[in-house]
Image: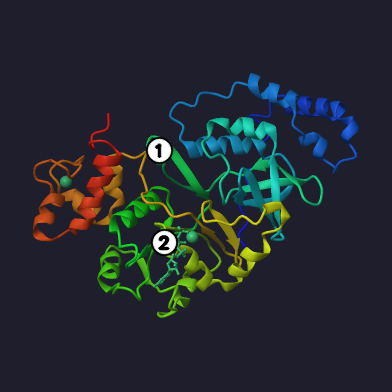
């Protein structure tokens, strides 16, 4: 079975409990005419009293608090709510879809107080978030609590590079899918995904798909040489055995990411034919049959794992790091770093830099150095953030 996530720290009712109880009893009275609804709903109905209470509570300073820490602090505040364990599995337009323990999917309302609490958190609910649901009727549910995130994957918003766009949470592996051709192999994009995976403590895997179109040997050697697990696949031709990749992903929560057209969805279908069947089944009236690759979508696999398909992106912007962080996340650069003259060397312009020296002697692959340079100079400024 899938691993249970979240809510373990939910016993902490002290901090942040403010006047919730008083607020809730007031609502129960105010909404007494709606008691015929599903038991418990009246306590979770959109609730001006708790909103008011929320506004007046001193929630402390956010200075220096990262997005994940902020989300988790808010999540702890909701942990006392009872409900059915579920996880966010996708979005239908603006409607959040959640999948319960039985694998059933629900279009969900989000409790207004939760919405308000999460207002300052960009993309507050993402695929992979563990939540609690209260059922309204056979077709509708309300999200009453959110669990702390174990981790999350974020990239820079393509319109505003200073903003982080979180696209999945509670992930075991980031499966970075690249194509050997059509579209051309872009190692720079692989390196960017590797960077965000490391930055978020998520294990990355490199999949070189469409290896029926071009030989993956050299690219596979580059990334294996850096210590990464690499699979060369062909989703289309079913050449090359994809079962080692399937074995590797077994029972885990994995995110498929990469450029549009590299074959993420094809790979998912080749790996898990039952998922393809599922895509047909879920297009019921609630979801209006819309199934495009424009939004992330989590599939529950027969082995208990989950696979998240994400829409292809052209670039994976990096934000919220400094040059030194990035250098440490590049294993080839980090290895040479101790030999640089300055221990805060950014490997851009400093004298006696072991990294630029290795570039001359072939000790580091120029593609890797160029992708590092691109992240540090284009995404993060000049490498000397103030
Ligand atoms: N030759 C070859 N073609 C493939 C392979 N895998 C996928 N394709 C083809 O590549 C095209 C794109 O595949 P998709 O699976 O839709 O790609 P995707 O990464 O999901 O793309 P987005 O959803 O746009 O991000 C389709 O026409 C597939 O048939 C492969 O291994 N070899
Ligand atoms: Mg796709
Ligand atoms: Zn250096």
Residue that numbered label 1 is attached to: 159
Q: SS at mark 2?
A: loop
Occupied quadrant, residue 29: top right
Assess disc 2: are there few (<14), some (14-19) or many (≥20) residues with their C-alpha within 10 Å of its C-alpha: some
Residue that numbered label 2 is attached to: 261
Tell me which residue sits at (10%, 52%) in the image: 357
Occupied quadrant, residue 39: top right
Task: Out of 2 and 163, give the one closest to the viewer.
Answer: 163
Q: SS at mark 1?
A: loop
- Measured from the top left, where is residue 102 in percent x and y? 72, 60
Assign the N terminus to one quadrant of the image: bottom right
Left or right of residue 256: residue 289: right
Which color scheme does this rendered protein use? rainbow
Could one spot residue 303 in this view of the protein?
no
- Measured from the top left, where is residue 154 in percent x and y? 44, 45
- Measured from the top left, where is residue 338 in percent x and y? 19, 49
- Measured from the top left, where is residue 373 in percent x and y? 22, 46
């Amino acid at each position: 079975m899938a691993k249970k996530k979240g809510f373990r720290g939910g016993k902490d009712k002290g901090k942040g409990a403010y006047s919730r109880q008083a607020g809730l009893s007031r609502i129960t009275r105010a909404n007494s005419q709606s008691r015929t609804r599903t038991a418990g709903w009246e306590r979770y109905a959109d609730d001006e009293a708790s909103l008011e209470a929320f506004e007046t509570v001193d929630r402390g300073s956010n200075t220096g608090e990262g997005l994940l820490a902020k989300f988790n602090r808010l999540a702890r505040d909701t942990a006392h709510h009872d409900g059915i364990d579920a996880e966010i599995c996708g979005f239908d337009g603006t409607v959040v879809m959640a999948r319960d323990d039985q694998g059933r999917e629900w279009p969900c309302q989000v409790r207004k107080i939760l919405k308000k609490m999460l207002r300052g958190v960009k993309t507050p609910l993402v695929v992979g978030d563990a939540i609690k649901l209260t059922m309204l009727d056979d077709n509708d549910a309300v999200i009453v609590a959110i669990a702390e995130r174990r981790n999350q994957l974020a990239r820079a918003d393509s319109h505003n590079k200073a903003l982080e766009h979180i696209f999945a949470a509670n992930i075991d592996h980031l499966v970075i899918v690249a194509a050997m051709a059509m579209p051309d192999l872009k190692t720079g994009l692989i390196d960017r995904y590797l960077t965000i995976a490391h930055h978020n403590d998520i294990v990355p895997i490199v999949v070189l798909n469409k290896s029926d179109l071009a030989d993956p040997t050299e690219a596979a050697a580059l990334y294996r040489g850096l210590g990464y697990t690499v699979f060369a696949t062909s989703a289309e031709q079913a050449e090359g055995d994809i079962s080692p990749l399937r074995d590797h992903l077994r029972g885990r929560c994995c995110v498929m990411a990469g450029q549009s057209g590299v074959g993420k969805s094809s790979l998912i279908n080749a790996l898990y034919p039952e998922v393809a069947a599922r895509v047909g089944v879920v297009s019921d009236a609630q979801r209006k049959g819309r199934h495009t690759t424009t939004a992330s979508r989590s599939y529950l696999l027969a082995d208990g794992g989950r696979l998240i398909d994400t829409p292809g992106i052209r670039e994976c912007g990096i934000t919220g790091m400094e040059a030194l962080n990035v250098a440490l996340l590049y294993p080839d650069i980090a290895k040479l770093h101790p030999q640089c003259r300055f221990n805060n060397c950014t490997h851009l312009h400093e004298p006696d830099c072991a990294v630029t020296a290795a570039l001359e002697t072939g000790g580091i692959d120029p593609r890797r150095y160029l992708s590092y340079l691109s992240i540090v100079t284009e995404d993060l400024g000049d490498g000397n953030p103030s």
